[in-house]
């Protein structure tokens, strides 16, 4: 029995002015990117996604420009999107742990438990606690994909919460709603330009009985002859010594 799933089919497209920050993700130094993504799927039929971005992700050469993207979908299917932009001095991120702050918004965690606080001027918000229920992983042991023979063009993917139990509140429509359900959190960073390296990617996750699945397929750009780079994660339960993982991340270049 599949208790939940979530899937993404993403096409990389040229950055356009009218896309604005809703189409974005990436980090402070030039030619680098970074983001923290966390989501919840709740028993009442609602779901929410939150991404802490350090710059627009389709152009890694752009300057540091932090912002948070909030997406909340209500039980009746209505979706609310909001972007919270902050100044550079309102951003901070720790090394070696999850501790990201953008103004009044923050994500903090220690691999076992993560706490999220989000609020916007438009009245959307969340206070959620995520408790890990499957082992964290770096797909392919290191979590790194390389896109050149000199190993300078690379991207990292750390799945801190392949599967988590979630409880807390979502705020929308002028009301605060108690929610509980399941969640996911990952951290991405790198030194390549998405428009030059990738054509598209697919990602999905699922929890089936006592098993957790995370699957991804990256398809490189025409420069790399559309080479495919698959990744696969399978865990039984939440104890690391009961984990079965068969990852594969191809080096491109």
Image (cartoon, rainbow, N blue to C red):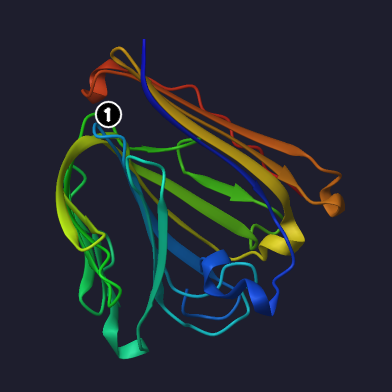
Q: How many marks?
A: 1
Instruction: Please state the horizontal and vertical placement of residue 165, each as a whole percent of the image.
Output: 20, 34
Q: Residue at x 70, y 56 (%)?
A: 12
> Few, some or many C-alpha atoms within 10 Å of disc 1 (few <14, some 14-19, many ≥20)?
many
User: Is residue 205 toward the left or the right of residue 126 in the image?
Assistant: right
Res. 100 image quadrant: bottom left
Q: Residue at x 46, y 43 (%)?
A: 142
Residue 19 visible (yes or no) = yes
Residue 71 location (% of width, % of height): 39, 57
**Residue labelled with disc 1:** 134
Residue situated in front as seen by the camera: 168 or 13: 168
Q: Position of residue 226 (x, y in %)?
A: 81, 43
Is residue 15 shown left or right of residue 79? Answer: right
Position of residue 131 measured from the top left corner of the image (x, y, whole percent): 17, 39
Quadrant (top left/top right/bottom left/bottom right) for the N terminus: top left
Q: Out of 1 and 230, give the one closest to the viewer.
A: 1
Q: Residue at x 28, y 85 (%)?
A: 90
As helix, strand or loop, the secondary structure at mark 1 comes to loop
Q: Does the rendering let one see residue 168? A: no
Position of residue 87 relative to residue 142, above or below, is below
């Amino acid at each position: 029995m599949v208790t939940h799933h979530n899937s993404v089919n993403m096409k990389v497209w040229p950055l356009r002015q009218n896309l604005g920050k809703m189409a974005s993700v990436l980090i402070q130094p030039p030619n680098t990117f970074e983001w923290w993504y966390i989501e919840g799927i709740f028993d009442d039929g609602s779901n929410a996604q939150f991404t802490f971005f350090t710059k627009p992700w389709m152009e890694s050469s752009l300057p540091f420009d932090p912002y948070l993207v909030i997406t909340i979908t209500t039980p009746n299917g209505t979706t609310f999107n909001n972007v919270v932009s902050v100044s550079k001095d309102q951003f901070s991120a720790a090394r070696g742990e999850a501790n990201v702050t953008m103004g009044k918004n923050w994500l903090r965690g220690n691999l076992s438990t993560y706490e999220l606080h989000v609020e916007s001027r438009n009245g959307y918000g969340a206070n959620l606690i995520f408790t890990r229920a499957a082992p964290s992983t770096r797909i392919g042991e290191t979590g790194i994909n390389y896109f050149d023979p000199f190993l300078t063009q690379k991207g990292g993917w750390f799945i801190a919460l392949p599967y988590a139990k979630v409880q807390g509140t979502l705020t929308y429509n002028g009301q605060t709603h108690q929610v509980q359900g399941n969640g996911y959190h990952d951290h991405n960073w790198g030194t390549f330009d998405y428009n030059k390296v990738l054509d598209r990617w697919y990602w999905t996750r699922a929890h089936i009985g006592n098993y957790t699945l995370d699957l991804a397929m990256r398809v490189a750009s025409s420069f790399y002859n559309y080479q495919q780079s698959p990744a696969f994660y399978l865990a039984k339960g939440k104890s690391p010594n009961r984990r079965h993982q068969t990852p594969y991340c191809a080096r491109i270049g």
